[in-house]
Amino acid sequence: MAEPVPELLPDLRPPPGGLVALRSRLDRRRAWPPLVVAAALAVALLLAVRRPAAAPIAADAAFPTLAARIAVPEAERGRIAASAPVRLTDGSVLVRVVTLEAGGGGDEPR
Amino acid sequence: MSADAPFDRAALEALYVRLERPLYNVVYRWTWEPQVAQEIVQDAFVRLWRMRDRVRPDTVEALVYRIALNRARNHRRWRRLRTFFGLRDDAVDPALAPDTALAAHGDARRLRAAIEALPDDLREVMVLTTFSELTYGEIAQLTGVREGTVGSRRNRALAELRRTVGGTGG
């Protein structure tokens, strides 16, 4: 340590209670991780409970819906496009397949 | 702290008791706010505690100074930004409160302005050489300069301060 220069850099006393505050901060940090984990779990649980389940739809209702949703762009002509599978009320899964080159598509329960 | 002693809570607290005041004095010359300076000092020790497994007894002191200085510089940058965008009112000068002796002589404001006007590298070396118990070699390592540069920067900083505020001694 070099010679002090009190007229330029006076040796100031820090505010009191520093060590007590430090202890408090260290203890608080130690208690943090379990709290954070518990909070994250609670949020995840809440989101899982509130997430709406995909409701099965009736076959006759599914067809127009899918037909409206599927649009195959020009660049895709000659290829096969398929919708995401939709589970119907009778338990079967419906996938709409469109083959434009063949002049149309079909809804294929499987 | 001896070389083979574990860095446990007791060691951390002992180090805090020993370094609180010099570290506070160093950080204060960046923040000019007593509470903020103290918070930064404590934050440095909290960070040190979180990385205690990697702490080496022979370099722990320099490490805590490095952490605190980085925090102080970041705080300064944010303060400047907040001031620039009008989110902070710098009209009140909280730095003058603890310097009662200097304030009595009416020099505190000029002194702060003079220290503020110093380039960071000069100020850093000046406060570290004045308050810390680090050797010139350790300060050179901490600041990334040669050992001889530490001494010359200190002399330049003090000369600049004396020229500005008209002080003597040291």
Image: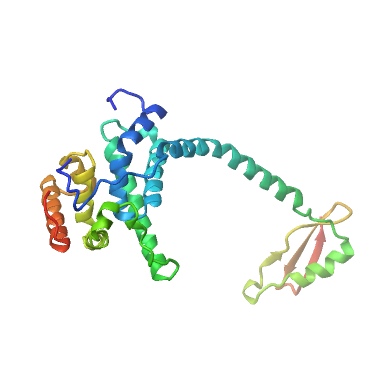
Q: Where in the figure is residue A40, as x and y percent of width and height?
A: 63, 45
Q: Where in the figure is residue B61, as x and y percent of width and height?
A: 28, 37
Q: Residue at x 38, y 64 (%)?
A: B92
Q: Residue at x 36, y 28 (%)?
A: B11
Q: Residue at x 66, y 74 (%)?
A: A73
**Quadrant showing the N terminus of chain B:** top left
Quarter of the rendering containing residue B22? top left
How many numbered marks, from 0 up?
Answer: 0
Seen from the viewer's position, the closer of residues A57 and B108 is B108
Single out the residue that lies furthest toward the bottom: A74
Q: Compared to B114, does B59 lie above or below?
A: above
Q: Is residue A91 left or right of residue A41?
A: right
Q: Compared to B36, does B53 lie above or below?
A: above
Q: Where in the figure is residue B42, as x and y percent of width and height?
A: 40, 42
Seen from the viewer's position, the closer of residues B65 and B54 is B65
Q: Is residue B170 left or right of residue A18?
A: left
Q: Residue at x 75, y 75 (%)?
A: A103
Single out the residue that lies furthest toward the front: B104
Quarter of the rendering containing residue B76? bottom left
Single out the residue that lies furthest toward the top: B4
Quarter of the rendering containing residue A13? top left
Seen from the viewer's position, the closer of residues B28 and A13 is A13
Q: Where in the figure is residue B108, as x and y percent of width and height?
A: 26, 58
Seen from the viewer's position, the closer of residues B33 and A64 is B33
Q: Compared to A83, does A32 lie above or below?
A: above
